[in-house]
Image (cartoon, rainbow, N blue to C red):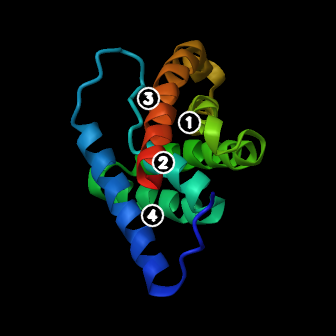
Amino acid sequence: MTPPPVKGARRLTLLALLTAIALTIFIAEAQIPVPIPVPGVKLGLANVVTVYAVFVLGPWDALLILTARVLLGAAFSGQPMTLLYSAAGGLLAWCAMSLLRNVLGERSLWLSSPIAAVFHNVGQLLAAAAVMNSWAVMAWLPHLLLAGVLTGTLTGLSAQMLISRLRK
């Protein structure tokens, strides 16, 4: 059962709150050292908010949250390249999730997250290939695909449980 649409100041407040939560998770996660020596691998826990937003609020509100998180995350991290890589990966992941939302439905939304994570990694590698003007970065693709499936499944299951708990 889908909740009624949130409008006006209440909608803006909800989007701002979800953006703040996603940004806080993003910044906290950036402080966690990754034990795997593969560039670009991280848990992606901030994406729990994006998955939640796509399936509960709709793709367009999720895109607003994602865009604000990417812009603010790049500003707060002080790394301008974060903006390019996060935007490229995030946009492809959002497209995949938005399409899968109609196919999978809310009961199996956890399946959309690993697929979106794979698209996110492909987007990041394409951005890196464009920046470096070389396809050599695609050598990391198998490692990132495996990491994306594992972390995406964790993110998807977390979002599934979050939605289930909030519905009660």
Q: Secondary structure at mark 1?
A: helix
Q: Amino acid at mark 1?
A: Gln
Q: CA distance from mark 3 to mark 2?
A: 28 Å
Q: CA distance from mark 3 to mark 1?
A: 8 Å
Tag 2 near tag 4, CB within 8 Å = no
Amino acid tagged 4 = Ala
Crowd class of label 3 (few under 14; some 14 to 19; many from 20; radius 10 Å): some
Q: Nearer the viewer, mark 4 or mark 3?
A: 4
Give yes or no for contact between labels 3 and 2 (Cβ–Cβ under 8 Å). no
Disc 1 target residue:
124
Tell me whether circle 1 and circle 4 mark residues in contact (CB < 8 Å).
Answer: no
**Hey, which residue is sitting farthest right in the picture?**
103
- Residue 53 position (above or below residue 64): above
User: What residue is shown at x 48% (from left), y 77% (from top)?
Assistant: 11
Sequence-wise, which precedes: disc 3 or disc 1?
3
Give the left or right position of residue 114, taking residue 14 as reference.
Answer: right
Could you tell me how far apart the alpha carbons at marks 1 and 4 are, in whole angstroms? Answer: 18 Å
Q: Earlier in the sequence, mark 1 or mark 4?
A: 4
Residue 72: x %, y % from top left: 37, 61
Q: CA distance from mark 4 to mark 3?
A: 20 Å
Residue denoted by label 4: 68
Residue beneath disc 2 = 163
Badge 2: residue crowd in 10 Å (few <14, some 14–19, many ≥20)? some
